[in-house]
Amino acid sequence: MSLTKFRSSSLSLAIGTLLAGCVAGPAPANYRAGLYAPHQIAADTGGHPEGDWIDAPATVGGAPACNGQVPSELATYRRAPISEFTSVNAPLAPGDRLSIRILGDSDRLSGTYVVETDGTVRLRGIAPTRAGGGSLQDIEAVLRDRLLQAGIVKPLRNAVSVSLIEASGVSVAVSGAVFEPSAVRAGERTPESRIGLKEGAVTGDANTARSVATAIRAAGGVRPDADIHRVYLLRNGAYVELDLSGLVHGAAARDVPITSGDRIIVPSRSCFDARLARPTPLTPPGIRVYMSNLTRSANNNAGAAIGKETTSLPYGTRFLQALVAANCVGGSYMQSDRRAVLISRNPINGRSVVIERDIEKLVRLADRDDYDPYLMPGDAIACYDSRWTNFSEAVGIVSQGISTVTPAILLDNAL
């Protein structure tokens, strides 16, 4: 090949590469069933990229209009009055520490006892006594009867006294419209906060973290589609319906104490409520998201200052705010036509969506709130190069290729 022909071919290749570098890729297509929030659609809003919305297969339905439903499994439970679940003394649970005093006994039976993992308390001379799930008065009465039958105490009214020293954390199951449905521990204490270890003998404890709201937070907090007006607490074949909306909206709410073995169900309303996309006693305080910024101004994530602190964002953060945190906004105006995508997943049906936005339009247009989505835990963000950056990259690639190959051609011609 002559040098002239080579240069002509190289020029054609360069022009093709440069033109390709100036073309933006097609907007992503999504199944309509993946839509979770109204802000994920940007139709007729200043020319943001809007790919095809495809109807999902019939086996996977999208989120319908707001439609709260009572869980079907409650049909096998008895509905109880809230007073049955809000007694003065919360039910005892494994790990609770009790002070048991026997009248006339100094150290043989009297002392501090811990409720075993099977919910019993073990005193010498009598069979294990069930304590978990009952009240202090319940175990006090049972212990008195058993010690009386064993001939250890006299039939006196105050022969046995039981008091609570420390209420430990409890294991409960949380399901429904929460971000991490699972078995959780609520009210767990650190060694520094253990009652009576430094103060000496004490009586009484108020572990306020042993509550329905704390257990929900331990399960990742409620999702924006949760029905917080109807939260169900299940215990021993009965259930109670709780309205916890006051914890979100700043009104009165009755948060019920829980015990080991309880179940909590948070129903879904099947629609997005933006008032639940912010830190509250029922929602997560913050979220973790994945970020990638590989634009020309930041050749890698380390250079873009994307680290652990950057990807940990307050709950309620929107797409544009996260783009600022990822250093995708600002810089040279030649890079102002960058685009970004948000990768999210509908927590109701598990369908994923990829939302693309023109960053500069998201910054400039006044109605940005209509198509600036809220971020959910586990979302991912990626920033794309601007056309000018693509052009610059293409020039660099072509120049590097020509400078590498031309010496070899010249050398070949010389031979």
Image (spheres, grey):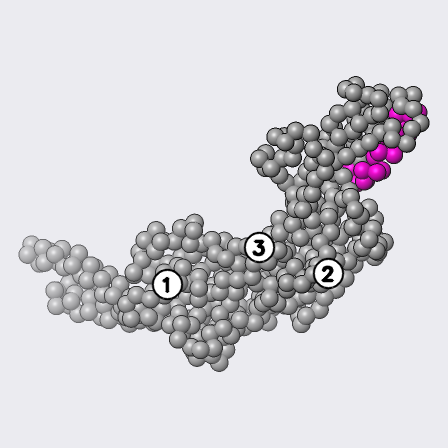
The stretch of residues the image draws in magenta is 132-149
Q: What residue type is labelled 2?
A: Asp
Q: Is residue 136 magenta?
A: yes
Q: Where is residue 206 in the image (x, y as percent from the top left)?
A: 69, 43
Distance Cα–Cα, label 3 vs label 2: 19 Å
Residue positioned 6% across, 56% down in the render: 414
Q: Which badge, 3 or 2, comes first in the chain's sequence? A: 2
**Label 1 Cα crowd, 10 Å radius (few <14 / some 14-19 / many 20+):** many
Task: Tell me the element at label 2.
Answer: loop
Which residue in the structure is indicated by mark 3?
A: 284
Locate the C terminus by quadrant.
bottom left
Task: Please say if 330 is above or below 282.
Answer: below
- Going by the numbered disc 1, the residue's amino acid type is Cys
Mark 1 and mark 3 lie on one chain; the one further toward the N terminus is: 3
Question: Compared to 183, does 267 lie above or below?
Answer: below
Residue under label 1, please give it: 328
Of marks 1 and 3, the one in the foreground: 3
Identify the residue shown where x is 44% and y is 64%.
Answer: 321
Q: Main secondary structure of the magenta part?
A: helix
Q: Is residue 72 above or below residue 190?
A: below
Q: Is residue 115 visible?
A: no
Tell me which amino acid carries mark 3: Pro
Residue 258 percent location from the top left of the image: 73, 46
Task: Name the mark on residue 229.
Answer: none
Disc number placed over residue 243 in the picture, else none: 2
